[in-house]
Image: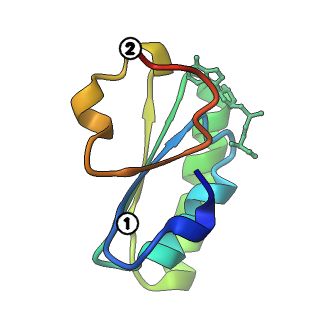
Amino acid sequence: MALTNIVPGESVRDLGPGGGIDCFIAAKMTGKRGRVVGIDMTDEMLINANASKEIIAKNLGFDNVRFLKGFLEEIPKIFLQKSVAIHLRISIN
Ligand SMILES: C[S@@+](CC[C@H](N)C(=O)[O-])C[C@H]1O[C@@H](n2cnc3c(N)ncnc32)[C@H](O)[C@@H]1O
């Protein structure tokens, strides 16, 4: 799903966000009433993403992004419901 589908107030899941760049773009698009959660399995990526998050939140004036550690294959389906998923690189059954 493309970033262009995101509207203000929306809940967004980025599956495999890496350094989080798309999460930060989505954070601005969904605004302070929205929420963005990035799920990644790699500690290094999560450290980088969280470091950038502080700067982005300061610039935006709000903090609506969270990064969680996890494997995409293990995400409960309910976590993805009523949200926009970006970078869905694997099939979740
Ligand atoms: C190529 S990076 C993509 C970064 C970002 N989405 C982008 O487009 O710039 C892929 C990321 O997905 C994560 N990843 C790959 N397979 C995964 C899995 N099965 N569960 C969780 N994270 C995964 C990797 O750790 C990596 O940070």
Image location (x, y in percent) of residue 93: 40, 14
Q: Which mark is residue 64?
A: 1
State the scheme by which the image is colored: rainbow
Q: Ligand 1 is located in which of the four quadrants? A: top right
Q: At which x and y percent is residue 83?
A: 34, 51
The residue closer to the viewer here, 89 or 35, is: 89
Mark 2 surroundings within 10 Å by alpha-carbon count, few (fewer than 14), some (14 through 19), many (20 or more): few
Badge nearest the viewer, 1 or 2? 2
Which x, y percent locates residue 18?
A: 67, 39
> Mark 1 touching mark 2, by CB under 8 A?
no
Callout 1: CB less than 8 Å from ligand 1: no
Looking at the image, which residue is at 62% across and 57% down?
2
Picture residue at 45% right of the left edge, 19% below the top: 92
Q: Nearer the viewer, residue 91 or 26?
A: 91
The circle drawn on residue 74 is: 2
Q: Nearer the viewer, residue 76 or 82?
A: 82
Secondary-structure class at tag 2: helix
| Number of numbered markers | 2
Image vertical order of residue 27 relative to residue 84, above or below: below
Amino acid at the residue labelled 2: Glu
As drawn, 11 above or below 59: above
Q: Please say if 52 is above or below 18.
A: below
Residue at horizontal 62 percent and vertical 41 percent from the top: 87
Residue 9's place in the image compared with 70, above or below, is: below
**Can you see residue 29?**
yes
